[in-house]
Amino acid sequence: MCPFCIRAKRLLDQKGVAYNEVRVDFDPQKRLEMMQRAQRRTVPQIWISDLHVGGCDDLFALESRGELDRLLGMTG
């Protein structure tokens, strides 16, 4: 497991967010699909609904700016 994937999942777990993990490390076709969809080669690539938010650092940047909860629909 990559440390960035672990960090991203840990943050989402702490927020109680359900997510769908797509493992691309052993599936070349899934990796190709991810690269085409994200236009990036690194993992993780994270989407919230249809919005591509980027990788782990991008996810944590959203959190530090206070924007992640809104994107996750966690604000009232």
Image (cartoon, grey):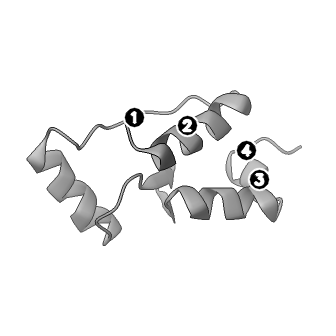
- Could you tell me which quadrant the N terminus lies in? top left
Q: Where is residue 11 in the image (x, y as percent from the top left)?
A: 66, 39
- Residue 69 shown left or right of residue 30 in the figure: right
Secondary element type, mark 1: loop
In the picture as drawn, the residue positioned furthest to the bottom comes out as 39
In primary-sequence order, the first of circles 1 and 4 is 1
Q: Nearer the viewer, mark 4 or mark 2?
A: 2
- Tell whether label 2 touches label 1 (CB within 8 Å): yes
User: Disc 1 versus disc 4: distance between alpha carbons?
Assistant: 19 Å
- Say which amino acid is labelled 1: Glu
Q: In this view, does 71 lie above or below 52?
A: above
Instruction: Give residue 42's position: percent from left, percent from top.
Output: 34, 61
Q: Is mark 2 on a helix, strand or loop?
A: helix
The image position of residue 52, as x and y in percent, is 47, 62
The disc, 3 or 1, on the residue closer to the chain's N-terminal end is: 1
Q: Quadrant of residue 15?
A: top right
Mark 1 or 2 closer to N-term? 2
Which is nearer the eye, 60 or 2? 2
Identify the secondary structure beneath mark 3: helix
Which of the marked residues, 4 or 2, is nearer the chain's N terminus? 2
Q: Which residue is drawn at 28% across and 37% down?
A: 23
Tell me the tag on residue 9: 2
Q: Which amino acid does label 2 sit on?
A: Lys
Residue identified by numbered label 4: 73
The residue to which callout 1 is attached is 21
Identify which amino acid the numbered label 3 is placed on.
Answer: Arg
Q: Distance between the residues labelled 3 and 1?
A: 21 Å
Residue at numbered disc 3: 70
Q: Nearer the viewer, mark 1 or mark 2?
A: 2
Q: Where is residue 6 in the image (x, y as percent from the top left)?
A: 51, 38
